[in-house]
Image (cartoon, grey):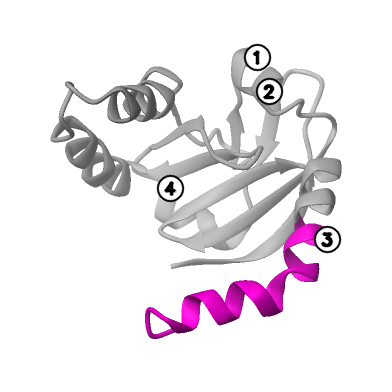
Amino acid sequence: MFIGEYNHNLDEKGRLAIPVKFRDELKGGAVVTKGLDGCLFMYPMNEWKVLADKLSQLPISQANTRAFARLMLAGAMDVSLDKQGRIMIPDYLRKYINLSKKVIINGLYNRLEIWDEDGWDEYKKKTEADSGTIAEQLGGIGI
């Protein structure tokens, strides 16, 4: 299970060190793709296969499902850890979220999120300010 928030730096070649506690889970490979809310999603290969299977079952006759499948699948890239525990983030994904040197890696149960530090700070401030309203809305589904 991935949890926590970690600060890392992107090097000049686009390599990002993955927190040590997550590396074993990613030894079998991973996929990085365009995420939501201004971040990238990173899934271990087994979790990616579950998501990709679900996406393949969506009806192609609906524009929203086609758009979401394109975002997730066409934007995806296989990655693997190098000997130093780094992954290479492709240029098109760095540009997608304006990824600079300072990076935040968040663990969210079955995936990691990769954020530019400024984007994460902005998102986190807004979400924390709205946390009471969010919690109230989630109460209706038993959380």
Question: Percent from the top left, x then y, of residue 29?
Answer: 38, 38
Q: In which quarter of the image is residue 85?
A: top right
Secondary element at image label 1:
helix
Q: Residue at x 57, y 81 (%)?
A: 136
- Circle 3 packing at 10 Å, graded few (<14), some (14-19), many (20+), is few
Residue 94: numbered disc: 2
Question: Percent from the top left, x then y, of residue 78?
Answer: 41, 26
Which residue is denoted by mark 4 in the rendering? Answer: 26
Whole-Å distance between the Cαs marked 2 and 1? 5 Å
Closest to the camera, between mark 2 and mark 4, is: 2
Whole-Å distance between the Cαs marked 3 and 2? 22 Å
Residue 58 in the image: above or below residue 135: above
Q: Does the magenta stretch include residue 131?
A: yes
Question: Percent from the top left, x then y, of residue 100?
Answer: 83, 29
- Residues marked 3 and 2 touching at CB (< 8 Å): no
Secondary element at image label 3:
helix
Marks 3 and 4, the one that precedes in the sequence? 4
Which residue is denoted by mark 1 in the rendering? Answer: 91
Which residue is denoted by mark 3 in the rendering? Answer: 125
Residue type of the residue flagged with mark 1: Asp
- Residues marked 2 and 1 touching at CB (< 8 Å): yes
Whole-Å distance between the Cαs marked 1 and 4? 21 Å
Q: What type of secondary structure mainly makes up the magenta span? A: helix
Whole-Å distance between the Cαs marked 2 and 4? 20 Å
Secondary element at image label 2:
helix
Residue type of the residue flagged with mark 3: Lys
Residue 78 in the image: above or below residue 8: above
- Position of 125 with respect to 32 (left or right) is right
- Residues marked 1 and 4 touching at CB (< 8 Å): no
Q: Residue at x 23, y 35 (%)?
A: 55
- Position of 64 with respect to 76 (left or right) is left
